[in-house]
Amino acid sequence: MANFLSNKQEHNTHDRFIVADDWSGNWQANVAIKITSILTWIIVVCGFSTSLIILNDIKEKQFQKIQQESDQKAYLILNFLHNKNDRVDSSNKIRALLFSNNFPYAELKIHNELIKFGQHEKKLECLLKPIILFKDSQAKNHLKLCHQPLKQIIREKQITTITIIGFITLIFAGINILIVSKIITSPFKALEKAIQFVKNGDLSTRMETKRHDEFGRVAQFFNDMLDGIQQDKDKIEESNRNLETIVDERTQELITTNKELRGTLDNLQQTQKQLVQSEKMAALGQLIAGITHEINTPLGVVQASIGNMSSSLENAIQTMPELLKYLEDEKLELFLNLIQMAQQQTQYLSTREERSYRRKISKILQQENFENADEIADTLVDMGIYDSYSSFFPLFRDAKNDLILQTSYNLATINKNSKNISIAIERATKVVFALKKFSHHDLSEKMYRSDINEDIETVLTLYQGNIKHGVDVTKNFEPLPAINCYHDELNQVWTNIIHNALQAMNHKGKLKIITKHRLGYIIVDIIDNGKGIPAEVLPNIFQAFFTTKKMGEGSGLGLDICQRIISRHKGRIKAYSKPNETIFRIILPINPIVEIS
Amino acid sequence: MNKATIICVDDEKIVLSSIKQQLKRHFNHKFSIETVESAEDALELIFELQEDNIEIPLLISDHIMPAMKGDELIIKCEKFIPNALKILLTGQVTPEAIGNIINHANLYRYISKPWNEKDFLLTIDEAIQKYYTEQRLKEQEEQFKSIINNINIGIFCIPLMGNGNYMQINPALIKLLGYTDKNARNNSLLQHFSDASKKEYFLKKIRLKGEVKNLEVDFTTKLGDNIKVSIYASAQYDQKQANIKWINGIVENIS
């Protein structure tokens, strides 16, 4: 409000002034009221005191008057009474006298007996009798004419006077009230009127502020207030108008932003799909990287072995006729035995073991004074002959021992190479089969019945290249019912978690996979004995883009996607970790569709 | 015994078997061929062979192996067998691994699986040849060094420009001119001429004719002795035959 008052501004273009009556224009209202009330008091007091004086005066005068009159009358009456001539006449005259002068009764004191008599004729007659009878000269002293009781008369007079004075006082008071009302109520009426206008929404209403009293100030305040309100209203209206434009603009902006957002959302969804796909491809890429090696290696072996075989065969064919001609019966038999022995060997030794055998054999041969003990030992071990070679010493001592050994080696390696080829092909076939099974990709996104054990086995086959020597895999599989699932997605989960496990233990350690079937759920535990996941990291591992791997090594989406896939199957995935034991537990309902309904 | 040994490393025994046969047939007992199934075994074998003083001219390694990978093995081997040539024979390798080896070791070749026998053996031959060439070069260098160090004639090599401090000097000359092994290279042959005009003559002749034959001059040695020496020196030119790169020659005491 202070603001309104101080901020008085003129906008009189359509102001309407409510005039508060300037009858007492320069009067201060409180002074006027005080004066009026004092005046009223004075009038009332004056009226009251005047009436008291007048009444007193009346009382005395009336008393005297009545005294005189009653004395005169009494005298006349006595005269009449003394006039014995005409009694009837005199009685009438007395009666007339009495009643004409409003003496309602008379008192007659006779012999201390007070006799009252009034207008009643008979009574008067009977009363008159004694008066006449006694004819007392002193009678006149005893006759007292009483008119109406004095009090009553005076009261009558008083009432008249009071009435008149009251009337006059009332008139004065009325005038006073009128004046006061003029002074006080008129501004209120004006204010009321003004408020009425304002109430009806006419804010241009203003009160006239000529007066310098409280009303003037009130009017001023009122006007200031209205100014303020007007200003505020103007401001509000203006800001309203602004607001409307702003709202319009904003709405427009919002619509545009909304459109953009929708576009962005579409893009995001697209990106998300792409990310999921790319993560899948990354998982596949990791696999393929391993698989390339897994396939190229057997291929290399096959190629090399075929070359070796043809060379060996070629050499053998070249040398055989010469050798067969050269060898005597005994040595020929030994030679054939040697070849046969080489053919029969099934023992699979590591290169380390082979090396120790070679050294052992070489030592023995050196003791037997063979010149080329190393070469013989090497050839023998390569042929797969690790013991009972002493029977062949005659062959080694032969002059053409080189030729004999070369030929037998060539013949033996044919078998060895063919075995290698079959091992290599078996390896490659297994990988290709697993890959085919793994990438059994179905775009129709239909669920298929699948055996989780088999799927995990497939993934393990694909990871064979990574597992091989360093990792000790324990499979603890319970027979599981086939479940409805998105086959390739679940495979992605197994791949990812097994890959993580292998990485966590740096491809060296124990990988344990347990599958269980409990109460309509399949539980898969993948446990590694790697370094474990730090407790502060554990809650974040399923978040998208969270990774502890090196830049470019992991997208941080793997486990997020795993979680999505598992929740798509209405299952759950959890990780528990402590050093040397990290468990990823996946729980899948056997029939996720039933779960939904 | 004690034949040079080629080491093959692969985690697949069938691969080792194939390689060994190929190499064996190719070299026909010229080299001993050792096969190992892991990088750790390879290192162990290398230590054993080094104990027995057996030469290792070549290391053929797979890349993808459990535990230690091929790149790591080759980088480690660089320390133990720096002279051996290293070949990576693998079915799959990342560019990072190759970069890693190139930055930290001396990779001779990279052969991808499946490999072609002819190419493979040719590469191996080249590698062996390179190894032995290098070895021979080293040996010859050693021999020359030994000759120069043991001969009783002073041999020097100094630049024509600059302070003329020795680029090469043999022990005989060090002894002759009274240097110690440490400070020899901070001196120059030219500071020993007793007669400045002889020095000018020497330089002039070198500049003009490119050589000085049997120039007999008086030398003041580092220790202050006066000796008479005979100098034979010739200038070595750069490829354009325009500028003299350095002067080398012999100094013989004839006093």
Image (cartoon, grey):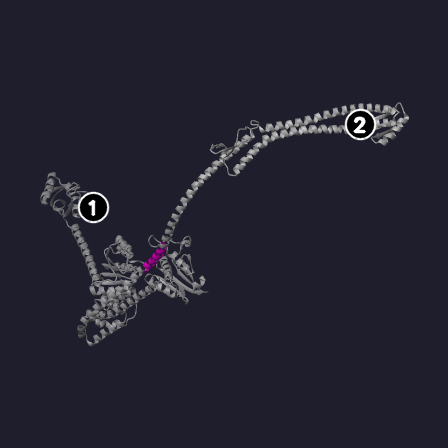
Q: Position of residue B59 (x, y in %)?
A: 25, 59
Please tell me which residue is depicted at 70% across the width and 28% down the height of the picture: A164
The numbered mark 2 sits on a residue in which chain? A
User: Which of the image's four quarters has the C terminus of chain A?
Assistant: bottom left
- At label 1, the amino acid type is Asp
Q: Share a chain, discs 2 and 1?
A: no
- Relative to B255, say whether A66 is above or below: above
* In-front residue for pair B44/A360: B44
- Taking the view exactly as shown, the residue that stands out farthest to the right is A133
Q: Position of residue B8 (x, y in %)?
A: 26, 61
* In-front residue for pair A510/B94: B94
Would you say B216 lies left or right of A434 here? left
Would you say B202 lies left or right of A494 here? left
Residue B181 got which mark? 1
Provide the residue span drawn in magenta. A271-287
**Residue A238 is drawn in which quadrant?**
top left
Q: CA gap, disc 2 to disc 1?
A: 187 Å
Callout 2 touching callout 1 (CB < 8 Å): no
Would you say A38 lies left or right of B62 here? right
Q: Nearer the viewer, mark 2 or mark 1?
A: 2
Residue under numbered circle 2: A100
**Residue A193 is drawn in which quadrant?**
top right
- Taking the view exactly as shown, the residue that stands out farthest to the bottom is A329
Estimate how packed mark 1 is, as few (under 14), some (14 to 19) or many (20 or more) residues with alpha carbons within 10 Å. few
Q: Position of residue B18 (x, y in %)?
A: 25, 65
Please tell me which residue is depicted at 38% across the width and 50% down the height of the picture: A259
Residue A214 seen in the current view: yes
Residue A222 got which mark? none
